[in-house]
């Protein structure tokens, strides 16, 4: 039975090969070899079906080349690309190759019509290596030099932690440089077009990231030697007479009142140390929050790409603002974190004038 | 090897080769997710999305309101619901708020600033985020975006109400009133400062700096 079936199969093959001749068929052995290509190396059989593939970029902004084969020009091939984020890029038509620099992963597609007029498409994904970016090194903080960020103080503040670029007290709660509302291309980041060729043509990406947070801690100018002078006219008589005895008349700074008029320097210095510690706590909290992985501004900006530069900056600003709120919030929380300590035995100035009541501060 | 077995073997090899080629060049179509789910996945995994704005602003064609609302609700949920606090989720929350805000302004995100129709559902979603998000920083930013979209007098009242609340949102409300809402907002901020009714420490500090700046 098996032998019979095998013979039938062979017979069928022979029938197919040995079909009827027509007038154009070659006649001699040499002509036959030439006419049918039997003198050529053996082919693979049926024509290769249409195909398409893309090379992968070796780095961010590296080139990818997509190449198609087996598609006739009459098939009106046209290219397109869709990023994994849904941004659509229309490509060229009537060409079987498309290449250019890449910033966004996605899928390249060539659409065409086959010989029967049916629309077809072939797709290939392109994976763009991401940039390893971090703004950790752009996040810094240090104790302020004398005079640094003094312009940001309000009269009644003991200490301050602010951006080194702070220029007024109304700006004191803006810790990033540039401040959130002024972030723009050329100021904190630079937006660049990918170019005019390839699957990412027309897209914009963030080419440079320069935003930073540079904090400074500072103590109120009124607590420093040579600080603000306050009138002694309505000061308690004890302070007035002490200052008179020390040849300080008319007005005195807080430092003079405690170090020169009276012998309260130790108590006063204890408070000053407490204020520095308090501000350091604010700064440490802000730095820690800003450097925390999910809050890394550059990392949050890195994948952004858009076909519109304005939209790209708006998206970047959204991330920037959110991280700023996180940093600001953590710095606020630090306000009450230290031990609440009472300081007595020193003269200070409140709105109502000179006082030596116990003063509390979270050190 | 018998002839029949040889033929079967050749046919099987050809069949495999054709199948492999098809896989390489044209993967079988996966079941397509609803567009809102595609956007959510993109926002969560890539920290970016290019589909939502053109739909919400009807940049390319008139869109079904139900589709627009479904996308907006999905973005709202991303910004509200608690999730693992990693880079991808933190980024996704900001992106979601940003898309809602831009849609409310009518920004399409398309090349050449193709104009769009402002999505009228943006303000209600942003307000939901302000009131319900698990993340205070997202509540704060959503409030800023909401305030810049809504220029009604009711918005001023809403900001005043938030300024009297506790928590960081109070400070944000104070800053918006004093800095971004013109004379009307500044008058409310001044009234809050003078009356001393604000209780949140940050909000009080913000009022103090504005009082210093504007000479209240």
Image (cartoon, coloured by chain):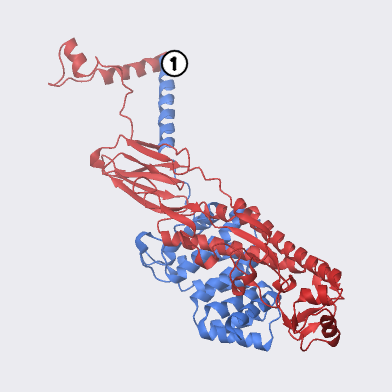
Residue B17 vs residue B87: left or right?
left
Residue A176 vs residue B8: left or right?
right
**Which of the 4 quarters of the picture holds residue A334?**
bottom right
- Position above or below: B186 against B32: below
From this viewpoint, which residue is outermost toward the left? A23
Residue under the point 44% across and 61% down = A311
Residue under the point 24% across and 17% down = A18
Quarter the N terminus of chain B occupies: top left
Q: Identify the colour of chain B in the image.
A: blue
| Front position in the image: A329 or A217 | A217
- Position above or below: B177 against B80: below
- Position above or below: B19 against B3: below
| Front position in the image: A1 or B163 | B163
Letter of the red chain: A
| Front position in the image: A210 or A116 | A210
Q: Position of residue A168 (x, y in %)?
A: 59, 73
From this viewpoint, which residue is outermost toward the front? A247
* Res A1 seen here: no
What residue is shown with label 1? A2
Residue A92 vs residue A130: left or right?
left
Q: Position of residue A12 (x, y in %)?
A: 31, 20
């Amino acid at each position: 039975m098996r032998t019979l079936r095998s013979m039938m199969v062979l017979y069928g093959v022979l029938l197919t090969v040995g079909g009827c001749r027509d007038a154009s068929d070659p006649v001699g052995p040499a002509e036959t070899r030439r006419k049918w290509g039997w003198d050529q190396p053996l082919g693979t059989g049926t024509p290769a079906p249409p195909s398409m593939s893309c090379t992968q970029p070796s780095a961010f902004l590296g080139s990818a080349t997509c190449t198609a084969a087996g598609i006739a020009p009459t098939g009106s091939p046209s290219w397109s690309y869709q990023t994994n984020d849904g941004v659509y890029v229309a490509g060229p038509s009537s060409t079987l190759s498309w290449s250019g620099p890449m910033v966004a992963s996605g899928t390249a597609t060539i659409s065409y019509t086959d010989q029967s007029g049916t629309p077809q498409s072939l797709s290939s994904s392109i994976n763009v290596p991401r940039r390893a970016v971090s703004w950790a090194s752009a996040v810094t903080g240090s104790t302020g030099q004398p005079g640094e960020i003094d312009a940001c103080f309000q009269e009644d503040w003991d200490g301050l932690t602010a951006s080194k670029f702070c220029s007024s007290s109304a700006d004191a709660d803006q810790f990033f440089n540039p401040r959130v509302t002024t972030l723009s291309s050329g100021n904190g980041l630079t937006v660049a077009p990918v170019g005019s060729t390839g699957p990412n043509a027309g897209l914009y990406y963030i080419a440079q990231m320069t935003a930073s947070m540079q904090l400074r801690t500072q103590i109120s100018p009124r607590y420093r030697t040579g600080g603000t002078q306050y009138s002694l006219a309505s000061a308690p008589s004890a302070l007035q007479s002490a200052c008179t005895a020390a040849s300080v008349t008319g007005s005195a700074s807080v430092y003079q009142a405690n170090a020169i008029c009276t012998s309260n320097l130790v108590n006063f210095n204890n408070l000053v140390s407490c204020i520095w510690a308090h501000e350091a706590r604010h700064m440490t909290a802000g730095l820690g929050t800003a450097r925390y992985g999910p809050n890394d501004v550059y990392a949050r900006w890195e994948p952004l790409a858009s076909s519109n530069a304005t939209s790209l900056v708006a998206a970047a600003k959204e991330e920037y603002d959110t991280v700023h709120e996180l940093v600001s919030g953590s710095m606020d929380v630090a306000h009450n974190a230290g031990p609440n300590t009472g300081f007595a035995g020193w003269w200070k100035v409140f709105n109502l004038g000179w006082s030596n009541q116990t003063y509390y501060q979270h050190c | 090897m018998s002839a029949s077995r040889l033929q079967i073997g050749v046919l099987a090899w050809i069949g495999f080769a054709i199948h492999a080629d098809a896989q390489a060049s044209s993967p079988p179509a996966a079941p397509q997710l609803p567009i809102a789910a595609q956007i959510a996945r993109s926002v969560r995994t890539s920290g970016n999305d290019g589909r939502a704005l053109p739909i919400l602003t009807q940049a390319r064609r008139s869109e079904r309101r139900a589709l627009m609302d479904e996308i907006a609700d999905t973005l709202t949920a991303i910004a509200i619901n608690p999730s693992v606090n990693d880079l991808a989720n933190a980024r996704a929350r900001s992106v979601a708020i940003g898309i809602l805000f831009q849609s409310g302004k009518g920004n399409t995100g398309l090349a050449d600033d193709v104009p769009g129709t402002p999505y009228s559902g943006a303000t209600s979603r942003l307000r939901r985020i302000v009131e319900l998000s698990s993340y205070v920083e997202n509540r704060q930013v959503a409030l800023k975006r909401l305030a810049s979209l809504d220029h009604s007098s009711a918005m001023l009242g809403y900001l005043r109400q938030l300024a009297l609340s506790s928590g960081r949102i109070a400070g944000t409300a104070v800053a918006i009133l004093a800095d971004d809402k013109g004379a009307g907002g500044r008058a409310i901020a001044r009234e809050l400062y003078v009356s001393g009714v604000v209780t949140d420490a940050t909000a009080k500090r913000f009022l103090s700096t504005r009082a210093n700046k504007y000479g209240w």
